[in-house]
Amino acid sequence: MNPTVLLTLGATLLACLFVILGVHAYAAGRAQRAALVERLTSAGAPEPTGRHRRFPGVDRRLRRTKLGRRIEVRLATTGLDMTPGEFFVYMLLGVGGVWLIAAALLAPFFGPVAGLIGLWSANAFLTWQRSRRTERFINQLPELARILANATQAGLALRTAIGIAADELEAPAGEELGRVADRLALGHSIDESLGELAERLPSRELVVLVSTLVLSARAGGTIVESLRNLTVTLEQRKETRREIRTQLSQVTVTAYLVPAIGLGSLLLVDMMMPGALDRMTGALIGQTAVLVALGLFTLGFVLIRRLSKIDV
């Protein structure tokens, strides 16, 4: 018999053997897991629950890279119930979707441009979620300072007061203070635990509160009076921030209307003159003009956002 045929038959039989062994190992693993879950349930332990995580293979590989670790840190500051692998896959699907939509509605030239805008939008979404979570935490700071002041006045230690505040407050303050309480229970100092909290949710109000608590823990003093004065100050700053946000709402809407007008004009030109965008982007001068226009619209959006940003 031909040696090539023998080699092919041998490789086929070996592959079949590996498939059989793999199926047997998989079935044995599932049986062991089912037996373990049944044993834990019968012993009174709750069955493992929680949201099913998608794309576990992508998540494991992504966490080994620098990009994955960076995404994980960004997600931790946003409070989103999402793994780095899930966010990465959803981001790729979104970029591919906007690429195809832009290429179909406008012209093939706009596909890569829309993909880059999609990548920027994913990063901007994480930044917006972090800012939104920080804003919600700032709004809870007066209540947090009040709870800490009452607990300290009752004679409780600062560590215990933080644990009580974590139980009393809703998310995100309750979740963040729960992390601080867990680190304190593991033996970390108040300086380190509160410092990490200030790094996760950067804001002037939180920095002032953390500095007050740290200084009081180090040197002692009238922490109750300091917290009560801080509560009044935080309430005033909260009202001031709300008034400024209301006054600048029209400017914020204008900033988002600027790029929307540019996109709308492109769609209008393509509707009035079908195929005009294909002919325009088919030449180098047309592509250059489009890129310059997109850059100017982006510059206008950034400038309006910067000018309307007021730090209180």
Image: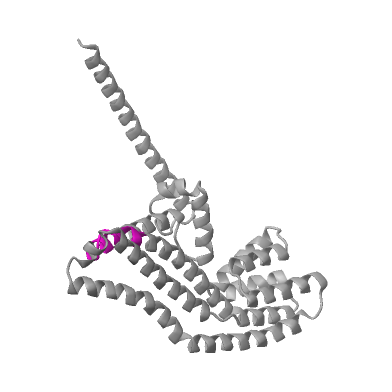
Image: 15 above or below 252: above
Instruction: Characterize the magenta stretch by its predominant secondary structure.
Output: helix
Tell me if residue 103 is in the magenta stretch. yes
* Residue 37 percent across, percent down from the top left: 43, 49
| Residue displayed at 49% across by 57% down | 71
**Left or right, 160 with reference to 256:** right
Image label count? 0
* Residue 305 percent across, percent down from the top left: 48, 77
* Residue 22 percent across, percent down from the top left: 35, 33
Query: Is residue 26 at least partly visible in the picture?
Result: yes
Q: Quadrant of residue 9?
A: top left
Q: In which quarter of the image is residue 116?
A: bottom left
User: What residue range appears in magenta?
Assistant: 98-115
| Residue displayed at 33% across by 74% down | 262
Q: Which residue lies furthest to the top in this view?
A: 1
Image: 7 above or below 230: above
* Residue 142 percent across, percent down from the top left: 62, 82
Tell me if residue 220 is in the magenta stretch. no
**Left or right, 195 with reference to 271:** right
Query: Is residue 154 at least partly visible in the picture?
Result: no
The quarter of the rendered structure image containing the C terminus is: bottom right
Which residue is at the front of the view, 11 or 117?
117
